[in-house]
Image (cartoon, helix red, strand yellow):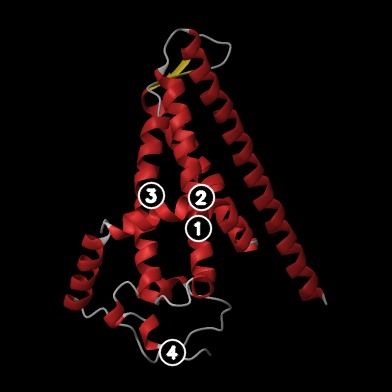
């Protein structure tokens, strides 16, 4: 009984510390967001339209990223139901094409959201130099992490059907076009070459823990169909 009570106290203490640290981070992000928005409005009142325009474009790109992040969860979860006539190889190709949006949007949003000088509200002070770079890094990182990756993935996992209903009509055709024109082809061939030269093959005797639903690693492994883990059809444990 005493051991159980001790474990519960430790768990409670860990949860409180985690929540406290998370709250501090969220408050800090909120302060940075206010400063970021204020700077764009301040520049706009001075006749400088670029910061406001780039801010809007950066946020719109982040929203596109959020949609794509959630779609990854939906496709892995419901691929066999949505496309019963398609193979794991098709899913892997779709996932690799989707990655282009992740890479390009993260880079573009970071560049567009960055400011060389950031005005602090109701003061004459500005954040510049290394402090400005730290500001841009922290704000962009947590904005993308919390609201463009974790949040949409969670929403899609809770209700993939509803998520696909609201986002699939506009996003899926775009990803399919990227997949069709072969944007991910160089990576696929490079993966095959590296895998062959380093003898990077699956371990057929490797035991896996019981799991529910599709496996992300199996989906990506199917990118190279002739040697992917998904093609081996290993039995569930």
Tags 4 and 3 touching, CB below 8 Å: no
Give the answer, above or below, for where 157 lies relative to 174: below
Q: Which residue is mark 4?
A: 234
| Dot 1 or dot 3, earlier in sequence | 1
Q: Residues within 10 Å of mark 4 (few under 14, many from 20)?
A: few
Q: Which residue is mark 3?
A: 101
Mark 4 or mark 2, which is nearer to you?
A: 2
Element type where label 1 sits in the image: helix
Disc 4/disc 2 C-alpha distance (Å): 32 Å
Q: Which residue is mark 2?
A: 67
Q: Looking at this view, is 106 or 26 the one in front? A: 106
Disc 3/disc 2 C-alpha distance (Å): 10 Å
Q: Pinpoint residue 81: horizontal percent, then vertical percent.
A: 54, 74
Give the answer, above or below, for where 191 lies relative to 43: below
| Dot 4 or dot 2, earlier in sequence | 2
Element type where label 4 sits in the image: loop
Q: Is 177 situated left or right of 32 in this image?
A: left
In the picture, residue 50 is in which quadrant?
top left
Disc 2/disc 1 C-alpha distance (Å): 6 Å
Q: Which residue is mark 1?
A: 71
Give the answer, above or below, for where 70 lies relative to 140: below
How many numbered marks have been drawn onto this rendered protein structure?
A: 4
């Amino acid at each position: 009984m005493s051991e159980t009570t001790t474990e519960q106290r430790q768990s409670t203490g860990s949860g409180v510390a985690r929540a406290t640290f998370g709250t501090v981070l969220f408050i800090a992000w909120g302060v940075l967001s206010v400063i970021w928005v204020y700077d764009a409005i301040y520049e706009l009142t001075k006749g400088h339209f670029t910061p406001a325009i780039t801010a809007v474009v950066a946020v719109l790109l982040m929203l596109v990223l959020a949609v794509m992040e959630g779609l990854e969860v939906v496709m892995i979860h419901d691929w066999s139901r949505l496309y019963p006539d398609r193979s794991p190889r098709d899913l892997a190709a779709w996932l690799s094409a989707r990655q282009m949006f992740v890479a390009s949007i993260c880079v573009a949003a970071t560049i567009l959201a960055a400011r060389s000088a950031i005005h602090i509200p109701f003061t004459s002070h500005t954040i510049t130099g290394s402090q400005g770079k730290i500001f841009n890094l922290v704000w962009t990182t947590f904005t993308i992490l919390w609201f463009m990756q974790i949040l949409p993935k969670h929403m899609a996992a809770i209700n993939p059907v509803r998520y696909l209903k609201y986002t699939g009509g506009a996003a899926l055709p775009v990803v399919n076009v990227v997949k069709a024109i072969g944007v991910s082809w160089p990576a696929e061939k490079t993966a095959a070459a590296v895998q062959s030269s380093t003898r990077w093959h699956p371990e057929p005797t490797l035991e896996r823990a019981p799991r529910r639903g599709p496996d992300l690693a199996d989906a990506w492994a199917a990118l190279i169909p002739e040697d992917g883990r998904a093609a081996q059809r290993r039995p569930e444990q």
